[in-house]
Image (spheres, coloured by chain):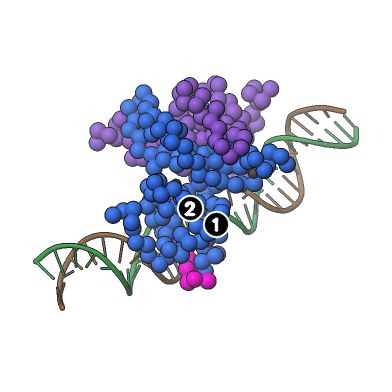
Chain colours: A purple, B blue, C green, D brown
Amino acid sequence: MQNQQVLTKNQKIVLDIIEKSSQPLKAYSILFDVKKKGINAPLQVYRALDKLVEIGKIHKIESRNAFIACKNSKCQITKATVFSICENCEDVKEIHDHKLSEHLKHYKDNKGMKYSKYNLEFFGLCKKCIKN
Amino acid sequence: MQNQQVLTKNQKIVLDIIEKSSQPLKAYSILFDVKKKGINAPLQVYRALDKLVEIGKIHKIESRNAFIACKNSKCQITKATVFSICENCEDVKEIHDHKLSEHLKHYKDNKGMKYSKYNLEFFGLCKKCIKN
DNA sequence: TAATTTTTGTTATAATATAACACTATGTAA
DNA sequence: TTACATAGTGTTATATTATAACAAAAATTA
Ligand SMILES: [Zn+2]
Ligand SMILES: [Zn+2]
Ligand SMILES: [Zn+2]
Ligand SMILES: [Zn+2]
């Protein structure tokens, strides 16, 4: 079963680092962190990242080239993601809004496209940064 | 007036290339094309791209690291963009859907974020690629 | 067992993007 | 006009992000 995927050693190490971070991590910062665990090359990190994205354990924040753990057991496959990004402190949160998801999931344009996936990024200022 | 911005020589050259393309162009492919017009270095292209994005003449397709001309006179500022991307032929179109825009523009989460911008990318198969 | 697929480790390199600096052009105000 | 400020240019060097290619090891399957 795809959702119950058994992770390999490298995949576990990389996932572990990302899950422990409250914020998105960049590939080379992950590489730096995992060097003490025997992962030496960018490719080893990118391969793990690719797989983790594929099975929905992490998501890529496209506008930031960074990776964040998915905390939602339901979105084990990366096909419908919404993020909130503070442009001041770079705080990123995944948004789980059922109504919004439904709206986007059923979106149809008039060009005959068949959609299987979407990614939405909202930008602005978080509560904390508005005050300062 | 910001929208009636007078473009500089380099900005015009780069915008011209992008407007003539039916599909998003990558920075280094633009660089290759503009070398015959006296633009020699990546920075000259990236500076022009930055400015053109800022004033809304072009948009960046984040998932592709590529740039597409905006054909909508109303979206002269890049703060509300929606794209349709075919994962097979990489055809990209900007979507202008008033209802969807309104929905997203007024979106509020429960975290006290103040949004000023969003970017939505739909992925799937275009009409042509579904048939094949 | 053998065959097949997946993952790994490694080196090298490609593709994308920015820093720093000196200089030029343009606009604004005394 | 001069002085000042702002924005754009040209250039070299470098940082950051990501993949190609290949051989070996591990896990899966038949
Ligand atoms: Zn998720
Ligand atoms: Zn913030
Ligand atoms: Zn547009
Ligand atoms: Zn297509």
Which residue is depicted at the point 60% across and 37% down? A113
SS class, disc 2 = strand
Query: What range is drawn magenta here?
Result: B36-41
Helix, strand or loop for the magenta stretch, by majority: loop
Residue A21: in magenta span: no
Observer able to see residue B38: yes
Q: Does label 1 or label 2 sit earlier along the sequence?
A: 1
Tell whether circle 1 marks a residue whose Cβ is less than 8 angstroms from ligand 3: no
State which quadrant residue B99 falls in: top left
State which quadrant residue C26 falls in: bottom left
Mark identifier at residue B69: 2
Nearer to me, B19 or B52: B19
Observer able to see residue A35: no
Q: Chain of mark 1?
A: B
Identify whether B86 is placed above or below A75: below
Q: Amino acid at mark 2?
A: Ala
Q: Position of residue A18 (x, y in %)?
A: 50, 32
**Is residue B130 shown left or right of residue B119?**
right
Q: Position of residue C15 (x, y in %)?
A: 57, 55
Q: Which residue is mark 1?
A: B21
Q: Quadrant of the C terminus of chain B?
A: top right
Q: Chain of mark 2?
A: B
Q: Position of residue D22 (x, y in %)?
A: 75, 52
Q: Position of residue B1 (x, y in %)?
A: 28, 54
Which residue is depicted at the point 49% across and 71% down? B37
Nearer to me, A22 or B52: B52
Which residue is depicted at the point 46% across and 50% down? B70
User: Are the residues tagged 1 and 2 within 8 Å (C-beta)?
Assistant: yes
Nearer to me, A95 or A24: A95
